[in-house]
Structure formats: C-alpha cells, structure tokens
Amino acid sequence: MLQRLMPESWRNGWYQDCKKYLKLRGQRWLDKRIPGTRRQQLGHRSIFILPTRAGLLFAVMLLIMLVTAINYQSSLIYGLTFWLFSIGLSAMYLTFRNLKGLILISREAPDGYAGQVFEIPLQLQAGNKREHLGLWLGYPDNPPRPLHVQRGQFETLQLSYRSQRRGKLQPGRLLLESRFPLGLFRAWSWIRLDFHTLVYPKPIHDSLRLAGGSDGGELIGATRQTSGDQDFRGLRQYQPGDSMRQIAWKQLARGKGLVTKDFDSDDGASCWLDWANISGDAETRLSILCGAVLDVHQKGWEYGLRLPGVEIKPTHSEAHMKACLTALAVWGEAS
Amino acid sequence: MSASLKQPLGLPRAALLWLLGSSLAALLPHYSHLPILVWVIAAAIVGWRWLMFRGVLPYPGKITKVLAVTAVAGAVVAGFSGRYTLESATAFFVAMSLLKLLEMRNQRDGFVVVFLAAFLLAVGFLFEQGIGWGLFGIVELWLLLATLVALQLGSSQLPMFAVIHRHTNRLMLVSLPVMLVFYLFFPRLAPLWTFNLQAEKAKTGLSETMSPGDIASLSQSGELAFRVTFDSGQQLPRQQLYWRAMVLDEYDGRRWSFSRRGRDVDWFGSGNDYQPSDADTGYEIIQEATSERWLFSLRNGAALEQGIGYTSTDLLVSRLPVYQRKRYRSVARATAASTPAYLPLSQRQFNLQLPESGNPRLRQWVREQLAAGTPPEQLMNSLLERFRQSFVYTLKPPVLGADDIDQFLFDSQRGFCAHYAGAFVYTARLAGIPARVVAGYQGGQWNSTENYLSVRQYDAHAWAELWRDGQGWVRVDPTAAVSPARIELGLEEAMREEGSFMEDSLIKPAQLRQLGWLYELSMKVDSINYLWQRWVLSYDKSRQQQLLQSFMTRSSFMDMVWWLIAAVLAAFAVMTLLMVLRAPSQKQSRIKQQWEKLLLLARHAGINAESGASPLSVIAQLQQSYPDLKTELAVLQRRFDQHLYAPDGATADTERQLLLQLKLCQLLIKRSKPVQFEPAV
C-alpha cells in the first residue's frame, strides 16, 4: 500500500535501502536471539505471539457484547462477555504453550547439486507432558506442511527446499507457526537448523578439458569413449565402489553372481582435472569440474583434482568421487 | 518478520458439522419469539448445506446468493410488517446469520459464523433468563469453543472428539477465575444510551386502567410478579401485605384509570431523603419486567436508590421503564412522612370527580341516606355491612351492562375485588368523601427455606382509600368485608368452594399440594430460581457496592477499576511466570549426564561429536572409529531406541538398561584406541 503511493525513485532508492537495512538488522537480531543449531528446543526466547485477524474481530465482538450488556443491564450477558474475554486471555497463553518445549532436530539429507530440490528431513519431538497440535511449518516461499505432534512422540517430515548455492546446505530460517487452540492468536518462531548436507556445484558437461597422465600432459576431449579400448584383464569379484559400467551383466544374467570386468587401465586412462586449464569465473570453473568428475568417474578412469590450494591424487573409487565433489562444494568457503 | 505461511485455509469437513450444530443450538433461546418462518428458513438452509456437504448440490453462485438474501430479508420484514422491535431485529439478525451459514466456505467464514452465534446467544439472554437457560449458555459456549478448536485441527488423523473435548474443557476451566473477578468487580454502569429497541412481548400484569373483570382475568395467571425479602427475615402479617402499584383516581363512567394528576415525585438524592428509623421495615424487591415505570411498595414507602422516586400519592416510580428484571430496596415507615390536616382544594375536587349521571339507583340511595341525616362515614359503614351480609366474592361474576355499579350493588351482588373497590369508591365520592382506588397485589406465598415472599399475578388486588381530615388517606378494603379469607389466606383458599382458582391451568396448585413430594419439589425449584435471581440475575451496581463494602473500607468507582487492573496484571503475571518457570528444566537427566560424559571421552579421542547431535549419528561415528566395540555400541543404540521411541513409552527398566550400557561403553572407549578416521578432504 505504502509502496504504491511513493514515487518510483523513492521506491528503488532509499526505501529499498531502508528495507534491506531493517531486514539485515532483523536477521542479526534473530541470529543472536535464536542461533542456529542442529537441535532447537522452543522456549520463551524463541516464540513470538500476536493476535490474528480473527482475534481482532473477536475483540470487536466482545466490545459490542459489553455495550449490549450495559444497555440492557443484563447480568447473563455480562457473564458471557467476561467469560469470553477471559477465554481469549487463556487462549493467548495456550497458543504460546502449544509451541513451547517442542524440539526440532535436523536429520541428514543426501548430498545433491545446486539447483536441485532437497527433501530436508526434520524431526519434531514432543515432551512427555505436552502435545503440540495444529502446527504449520515450512521454508518461506515453499508450501507449508500441517503437523500434529502428540504427547511423548515424535514426527519426521521432509521439507522441500531448492538450493541455488553450492556449499554447505543452508536453507535459512524455517517458519513454524500455530494458531491452536482457538485461532485468535498466532504463535510463531523462526528456526535455523544446521545441516551437514553438501550442495555440489551444478554440473556442466561440455567443453571438457582434461589434463592427462601423471606428467601433466594435456588431453582435450574424451579420447577413449569406452572401456573397450582398454586391455581386458579378466573377471573378479564385485567390490562396493565399482562402476556400474564395469559390471559383467552377462555373467549376472547367467546366474554367476555379481562380477566385475577388470581392465588394465594403468596407462592413458589416468587424468588430472585442473582448475588452471579451464577459463571462466570461479563458479563456472567449479561447475565444469564437477561435470568432469562425474563423466570421468562414470568412464571408470582414474582422475585427480587440482584446485587452488587443493590437490587430490588420481585414483578411482566412490569415496574418491565423494572427496572430489566435496572439495568442489566447499572450495573457497571459510572453513 | 511477521510474514506468515500461506496456509490453505479451507473449511475442514469435520468442522462443518460442529459449525452447523453450534449455530443451530444458538437459536434455541429464541424459541419463544422467532416466527415459524425463521425456523423454516433455518431448516431449509441446514438441509441445503447438508446436501452441499454430501456433494449433491453445488456451492451457491453469486446470483443465487443475492436472491436468497433478498428473499429472506423481504420475508422477515414482511412477517413483522415492518415493525422495529427487539423481536423483529433479532429475527432479521438470525436470518442473516443463517445465510452466512449457507455461504461460508473458508476458515475466516467459520470464525464469523461462530462469533455471530455467540452474539445470538447473548441476545437470547434478553429473552430467557431462567437458571436452565443459564446452564444451556454454558453448554452452548462449550460448543462454540469446540467449533473453533475443530476449525484449527482441520482434517487430521487425531482422535478428534477426545482432543476437542480436552482442550475445550481446559480453556473454560482455566478462564473461570478471571471471569468471576470481572463479573464481580467490573463497574456496572448505567445504560450508555436509552434503547428504543425493546421486547414487545405482551406482559401479563396490572394495566393502568381498571374496569370490572380486569383483575379477575389476571387471577388465572400463576406468573411471578415479584419477590420480596424482608430485612428482618420474618414474614409480615398478611393483613399488612398490600403492595401498592398505582392509584386509579380518574373515573369515566366505566373505567378507573391512573391519571398521575396532582402528584409530585421526590427523586432519590433530591435532598428530601428518607431518615432511617428502627421502627421501619426494610425490604428488598426483585421485580419481573413490566415495561412500565411504576414499582411496588408497601404503605408509607421511601425511595432509597438512584433512579427511583417517591410520589405524593405514596407510590414508588422508576425513572426508566422496567424492561429487565429489577432489584431495589425500599422501606415501610412506621409513621407517614407527613400527615396534612386537609386535602388541597384542587386535589379534593379531583378525588371527588364523577360523571354527571349514571347509576341512578345508587345516586338515589345515597341522596336519601344523606337527606335522612346519616353522616357519610356511617353511610360507608352500612355499605360495608351490606357487603358482609349478602354479597358473594367470585371469580365468575355475571357480565354487567350499562350502569354497572347499580346492577352490581342492587341486582347481581356478585363480584371480584375490582367490583367492590370500584363501587365503594364511587359511593364514597357520591357521599362527598374524597376517595380513590389503589391497584397492586395483596399477600404472596412465603418460602420458609429461603425466607422470601413470592407474589404472583393471581395475587393482583384492588382496594379503596378514603380521605379523612387529620388522618390522611385511610385504607379500606371492601373485599375483606365480603371474603376475609382472601386477605388472610389468599385467593386459593377464598375460592376453594367455587373451585375457580387457576381452573384453566393443567395442574392446579391444589392438586399439586396433595402430592406432597411434588409440592416440596416445586418449592425447592422455586428456591433455586430465587437464589439464581438474587445472586446472578439481579447482581447490579448496589449489590456490587454491598459486596465491595463487605471487605473494603471505602468503595468507589476508582477502587473497582484498580481491582480490575490488579486482576488483569495478576493474570498476566501468573501467565508470564508460567511461561518462564516452565522453560525446559536446566537440570539434566541422568541419561543426559552419562551421554555427555561419553561424548567427552569420544572428543578426547579426536572424534568430532557435537553435543546437539542425535545419538544415532554419534553412535554411527563411534562405530567407525572403534570397530572393536561395534557390537556393544549397537546394543547401546538399541537401548536408546527402546528408551526413547518404544511404543509403550519409557519405563524405569529401559532407563536402567540404557544407563548400564552407557557406562559400559564409556569404560570400553576409555580402554581402547580409536582407528584414525580420515575425513574425505
């Protein structure tokens, strides 16, 4: 409303600045008051409460009822009015109490890539003496979820959050609110839960530049597209971490169990994924490297990763891939 | 900061039933005055809504809504032929609330419907105030709150009724103390503005005119007129219980009417106040609504309260019409305030006023008697003597034509109190004695358990007052001459032979009395109603002052306001205390202590375990670092599961087992070396 009335220049100028400043101050104040943790118990410091629109309507109705009682000198209407008033006060306390003592715990979500929707698992736990009903929670701009947590029990749910940033998953503050029991008051809390989940850079799969061999010689493009080019050494027992492409599917179909085709990949199939060999800004480089890690891993090559300040020696395993992706995700972030 | 979640706030299906139920229940106190039309509308709308609920009918469109509103509004206005009374306004309000019930579609509409129903309940208390309706109000309040709770719960898998029940009960009970404080101490103000909107329900009771037969029709009604408690707690002799309401001093040849002429009113507080005396009899009256200004009092009354006046005709009047039940105090003075030696000329003339002609036989008789030298006093005594000898007191007097007093005195000789009082005053005026009819009630029924007197409509009575120089107005009750039983024992006894007392009612009081226990019960019920009226319904400003004075030295409006503020502050303080004190206890449980100890040991061994992390993730971490202890740690994990998440809840047993395992693991961790776990980076 106010925004519409003011001239364009104001709206984009000082008004925007003020809003940003206030928002920042508000965020800081919240960070101080309700710091982020992996486990948050709601208490009187972290719960806010205000009347809802229905609560204001209720107040107006009480006023009309009081005037009726006075003008008709009716004791019964006085009684009803005062009881309702008193119930309104109690509802304020009970709405507050409905959130208090509730424990939120962050569970781990599987790692993912920037731009992807994360299903963040949360656990809400009630104390042994209290139930928490009519809860709504969600990240701002995401559809909220209704929830009831009964006495002494816990509920797990997954909240959707789309992360655009690589790094440690930081979904920001979660809004938890409740109007239970009467809807006359709304109690809410902004909760920041910390997660260990990592967000890898958004992979880019083109313009692959790889550094080949341990000597650092340059390889451009994928010279060997298939493992068929490599020397076939024999079959061995499947080990966790083996690439799907190496599994001998025919053997599996014949009922001989999970067997891996072993290739002699010592020479030529080893490469360095090097930051220095790619152009573009840092995020683009990281994205390209991420795509490269995925591609090369799928090909079954041994690969190493070089980032400014980070070097991971070439090898090939699921754990190795994870280490590379992690390095890409957290690169440049204050440790 | 106050951004709220965009909740889909539809109307939960489960809440719809609560909404329909509680809204309909709110109509019940209006049963006596709502026209049948409104009930038809209610049934139609609930049926419609039900079909919508079942999915048979669609939600009404815009045009349907406009048509429905116009039709219903038109029907209600036409039904009351455009009159603006409390009943018509209420019916209109009810009809509109019902339409809202049809139209509601989201949660906000649900709130509006509940608030409308709450207001309807309040308005219903203007029509029904019995203790039964008071209890009904509590039930209805419960229903309305339950509806709000159901709206909040939405459609969930919870055991709905149990949850609603628990929370509604808690809300109502927790709110009782603050409600009582407000009820007792909130200043009872005078009406903020005078309302013209009043109930038009025809009230049975005295009317301001009296023609023969009027009071006889009242005697068929057992409705309560007022209740009295005497300060002494003792019953006065029945012969003294003449409750004055009006002085009927104008006669038009057929009717006696209340002229209010030549009367001065001394309003309370105008400086001419009553001086208390021990010989006087104080009493308190709780009067039912009459929509009139006159009040009831014994002879030689006095105005003791604001808004009440005492007239020179020895009556109590109220400044405002008595639209609601009214409680007031008065006093019967042992001696009249002042006895004028003579009646002012204008009043004398007025109290002698009669039509020029009519009742020739009586005129003839009085003229003859006076000509024969009989003093007027003597003449009146001989009339009373005639009443005593040959007249009959009856509730079924014959219908009289023109010259009704002649017919009554010389032909039928049968009549009710109005006949006797009217004829007596007429004769006195013919004989030159200033006289007037007084209308009111006589007697009453004494309730000996709670010590109060109930005066009912059948106690209505009319008697005469004659002026005697030097004595003032003297009461003469001709009915007492005809039927002493009426005065000493009441109408029922007086009519015992005729059997005409309350003959139209289904259960006659006499029959009731024969069934002893039923009579006892009816007296008990009457006592309960009396207590309800005395302590709840007529709790008003002066009662409030009495209460405050009983535990405060000085009572004033401001004191009351302070009390209220203190009450609210106390309530808030209690709430804040509850909020702060009930914060999660700082004292850690034994399990938590042991767990922290374990974490500390792990941290010494170089394992990064946050104290906030869940046991599950920490134990997994520990299992990686201490492969040797894998089984023991798995047992620990299971113990945790059993203790925290077991379906049958934590018990002392699971706690003991968990503690044991925790201590065992601590010991093992202390003794063994962790495998260096290399993070991925």
Image (cartoon, coloured by chain):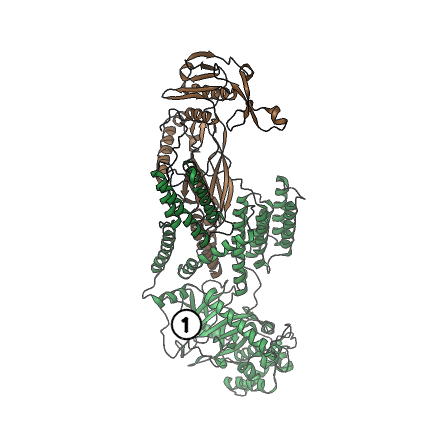
Chain colours: A brown, B green
Q: Quadrant of residue B3?
A: top left
How many numbered tags mark residues here? 1
Please tell me whether residue B646 is drawn above or below residue B273 in the rendered image: above
Please tell me whether residue B440 is drawn above or below residue B171 in the rendered image: below
Q: Residue furthest left?
A: B553
Q: Percent position (x, y) of residue A32? A: 34, 38
Q: Residue furthest right?
A: B56
Position of residue A217 in the picture relative to residue B516 (left or right): left
Q: What residue is drawn where x is 60% and y is 24%?
A: A249
**Residue assigned mark 1:** B302
Q: Quadrant of residue B1?
A: top left
Disc 1 packing (10 Å; few <14; some 14–19; many ≥20): many
Residue A282 appears in view: yes
Residue situated in front as seen by the camera: B589 or B261: B589
Report the amino acid beneath label 1.
Ala
Q: Quadrant of the C terminus of chain B?
A: top left
Q: Percent position (x, y) of residue B212? A: 60, 74
Residue B2 appears in view: no
Position of residue A171 in the picture relative to residue B513 (left or right): left
Chain for disc number 1 = B
Q: Percent position (x, y) of residue B439? A: 52, 73
Q: What residue is drawn where x is 59% and y is 71%?
A: B221
Q: Percent position (x, y) of residue A267? A: 47, 15
Residue situated in front as seen by the camera: B77 or B95: B95
Residue situated in front as seen by the camera: A143 or B555: A143
Under tag 1, what secondary structure? loop
